Structures are given as C-alpha cells and as structure tokens.
Amino acid sequence: MEMQVNGNKSGYVPQPGDFTFLPDRDIATDKNFASISYWKGVAIHFFKDKKAVIGLIIIVAIILLSIFGPMINSYGYRDIVSFRNENNKKVVAKGIAPRIPALHQMLTGESYEDDFADLTFLFGTDDLGRDLWTRTWYGARVSLIIAFVTIFIDMLIGMSYGLISGYFGGVTDQIMQRFVEIANSVPRLVIVSVLAIFMPKGMGLVIVALLLTEWIGMSKIARAEMLKTKEQEYVLASRTLGARNGHIIFKQILPNTIGPIITQVMFSIPTAIFTEAFLSFVGVGIALPQCSVGTLIEDGFNNITTLPYQILPPILVLALLMLGFNFIGDGLREALAPKLEDM
C-alpha cells in the first residue's frame, strides 16, 4: 500500500542531498554557430581564400618596396651614376645589365673587369645611366599615390552622389542620372586631351582626369544599394520618428551598403593604376624627370632593341599590382556576400 507523505502518493521521500550541482561538468558548446560580429566573419572568410591572401601579400610587399626600396642604395631616381677614372675622365654607367658583383664572383670565381665592378645594380641602369632599381620602386610609389588619392576622392563623390540620387528618387533621381549618362558618354581620351590644353603634364593632370571619370561606377553601385535598402523597416521607423534625411542616408543606410562599395574600390584601384600607366605611356602623364610605372614602360619600349632588360621591372610591377588587387577584390566580394555552400 502506497504511503502519502505531504501529498506525495509515492513511497519515496526526497532527501536534502539528492540534487546537487556538478561544477566540473564539461558542457559542450557549438562553436560553429557562436555569435561573431559581421566584420569578424568577413575577415574569417577572406583569410580562408588562398588567392585573396596571396594578393594581399603581393600588394603589401610592393607597397613596402615602394617606400623602402629607394633607400637601399644611395642613388636618387634622377641621379646619373658616374665617377672619374684615373685619367680624370667622367665615366657614366649607361646601359649596364642587372648584376650583383659579389654573387657573380661567388658563382664564377671571377670579378668584373669594367669600371663599375664594385657597384651593384639589381635591375641594371637605363640609357642615361640611372639606377633602375630606384626608379622602378619610386615609379611604383607615384602610381600607388595617384591611384589611392583618386579612388578615395572618387569613392566619396560617387558614393554620396549615388546615395542621394537613389534616396530621393523621382525627379531628383531622373535629373541626376541624366547627368551621369552625359558624363559617361564622353570618352576618357577626349577629357584628357582637353585637360592637356589647359594643364601642364604631371601628377595633377592624371589625378584630375581620373577624378572626372572614375566616380561614375561608384555612384551606380551606391544608387543600386540605396534602391534596395531604403524601403527596409528600420528606415521607415527612422522616418516615422522624425530623423533627418542626412542622418538616415549617412548614419543608417551607408553602413549597411558599404560592402559592395568597398569591393568596387578594390576593383577600381588597378583600373586607376593602368589608366595612369597608359596616360604616361602616351606622353600626357607624369613629366620627366619624375617617373611612374607608365613612364618607365615607355622608356623601356623606346630602348627595347638595345636594352631589352629595361622594360621588364616596370611591366612585372604593373602586372603584379593588377593581379594582387583583383585577387583582393574577388576575395572581398566572396567574403562580404558568402555563398551558402561556403558558410
């Protein structure tokens, strides 16, 4: 017969020590679905992409070489390497092929017999006797400065233009987009030709030419993201609460649309570098004696029959820059909007 204790029909009476905590118990946690921030997730996906990491290493290496490379030797980018021999005659190091005397002597057991046997030229010298190592990395520095400055300004202009156009819509959007179509229909060479009439050749002309053309792609990306985002619930809630248009555009919508814009920036930088190289190659870019990747390629092309090695360093730098930034752009595009199978 069952006993009833304090209303419990069971025969078991609970005791004080029956239920205790287990502090040493190992509770498993699902780390795959642990809460992580958006940008941390982007970084994780980015560094899982081998091509993106390779591109990042290439770009960082070129940036470091463009900063510290010219400091390795004592020659400036415009200095002509020369000295006076025993007869007090000035000797200029014109057209010396790449060589490292110490390495040559170690491999062959013979030393150089010319007047510049004690000098090292990793990339050789050009037809005027200027060190190509210094000029190559100085030219890469100039090209990178032009690209970063113009793309940063173009991003600000194009992003603001596209966000404002897409947010207000209606007549405002129609007028602003007709202006974009007119600006986009003018060929870049026509713009450069007109600028060359009123501006001297140099970095300023290249920057202005890029500023007038590269912002259009940014504005289209920003406008498309705005049209997709402006009807979201949080935007409608901000309008209902009386938030100003500027606050909604730049404080709430912009942070949620920055991913595609960053990807577009990564793809626009190699375009700007290539455009600068092309303008300098055709003679309307960087003015001598200052050099860039484009002017070095032009010099190498002019001397390709007599000094064929001269064109190789700037071409390799340009190719690596284009390749590296495109790898980074592909990696960011996948990281900012990962596919389901990559999750």
Image: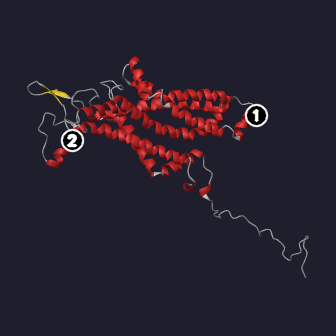
Residue at coordinates 37% horizontally, 23% vertically from top-left? 202
**Residue nearer the viewer, 289 or 99:** 289
Quarter of the rendering containing residue 120:
top left
Residue 225 location (% of width, % of height)? 60, 38
Query: Hey, what amino acid is under mark 1?
Result: Thr
Given contact means CB atoms under 8 Å apart, are the residues at marks 2 and 1 in contact? no
Residue 200 location (% of width, % of height)? 37, 19
Q: Residue furthest bottom?
A: 1
Instruction: Please name the residue that numbered disc 2 is placed on.
Output: 100
Label 2 – label 1 distance at C-alpha = 72 Å
> Callout 2: 10 Å neighbours few (<14), some, many (20+)?
some
Quarter in which the C terminus is drawn: bottom right
Q: Mark 2 or mark 1: which comes first in sequence?
A: 2
Residue at coordinates 53% horizontally, 34% vertically from top-left? 218
Residue at coordinates 32% horizontally, 30% vertically from top-left? 295
Q: Residue furthest top?
A: 198
Left-right relation of 239 to 76: right
Task: Give the structural element (helix, strand or loop) at label 2.
Answer: loop
Residue 145, label in figure: none
Left-right relation of 200 to 253: left
> Callout 1: 10 Å neighbours few (<14), some, many (20+)?
few
Residue 240, label in figure: 1
Residue 116 location (% of width, % of height)? 16, 34
Task: Give the structural element (helix, strand or loop) at label 1.
Answer: helix
Q: Is residue 260 above or below residue 152?
A: below
Residue at coordinates 70% horizontally, 28% vertically from top-left? 244
Q: Is residue 101 visible?
A: yes
Quarter of the rendering containing residue 167:
top right
Q: Is residue 153 visible?
A: no
Residue 223 location (% of width, % of height)? 59, 35
